[in-house]
Image: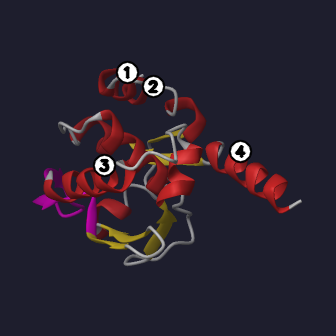
Amino acid sequence: MKKHNYEVSIVEQRYKNILKANDLIQKARNNLGILQLKVLGYILSKVTREDKPGKIYTFDIKEFCKVCDIDPTSGKNKGDIKAALQSLRDKSFWIVDENGKDTLVAWIEKPKIDSKNSLVELRLDEDVQKYLLGWLEKYTQYSLSEVIPMKSRYSFVLFELL
């Protein structure tokens, strides 16, 4: 019975929505690969309107792999996820804040991986987070399930822009 509930949970997670301000989609031109985009999409699917700045988001690497149709038994998943998280942390970009100032931000802050149970903990950059909570008038919303099958970063980016 537990396995069935877990499988339902995986399916439910695939249909969670991702909400991004259009400004963030259009201005955050970055060079992220498809795995980085999927990791980011998975993280953003966990964001809710009630979240406060500085909230710590947690996810299990094996669960991420199952949700995103990646072989969860691959021995390289942890290393791939570490590299994806490092890329999300290191690839900064400029956004214009509410005062009209250009601000250098990164997608995430302080990612940590608990090696014993493959749990990832991280915070979203506080300045980026406001572009994800639907506070702004113009935003795009889509389901994680719509981007999971994508194999190219170009299709992912084009999907968001359209």
Q: Amino acid at mark 4?
A: Val
Q: Amino acid at mark 1?
A: Ser
Work out whether mark 1 precedes mark 4 in sequence or the reverse, and give the earlier one: 4
Between 29 and 62, the residue placed more toward the observer is 62
- Nearer the observer: mark 3 or 4; the answer is 3
The residue that label 3 is drawn on is 80
Are the two marked residues, 1 and 2, in contact with CB atoms closer than 8 angstroms? yes
Image colouring: secondary structure
Q: Residue at x 26, y 35 (%)?
A: 33
* Residue 143, visible in the rendered structure: no
Residue 150: mark: 2
The residue that label 4 is drawn on is 11
- Decide: few, some or many residues near mark 1? Use Cα within 10 Å; few <14, some 14-19, many ≥20: few
Secondary element type, mark 4: helix
The residue that label 1 is drawn on is 155
Residue 26's spot in the image, x, y percent?
Answer: 27, 35
In the rendered image, the vertical position of residue 120 relative to residue 79, given as above or below: below
Work out whether mark 2 precedes mark 4 in sequence or the reverse, and give the earlier one: 4
Number of callouts: 4
User: Was residue 120 drawn as part of the magenta stretch in this picture?
Assistant: no
Q: Residue at x 15, y 51 (%)?
A: 91
Residue 73's spot in the image, x, y percent?
Answer: 51, 47
- The answer for how far apart the CA atoms under marks 1 and 4 are is 23 Å
Secondary element type, mark 1: helix
Q: Residue at x 51, y 63 (%)?
A: 60
User: Quadrant of residue 122 in the image?
Assistant: bottom left
Q: Amino acid at mark 2?
A: Met
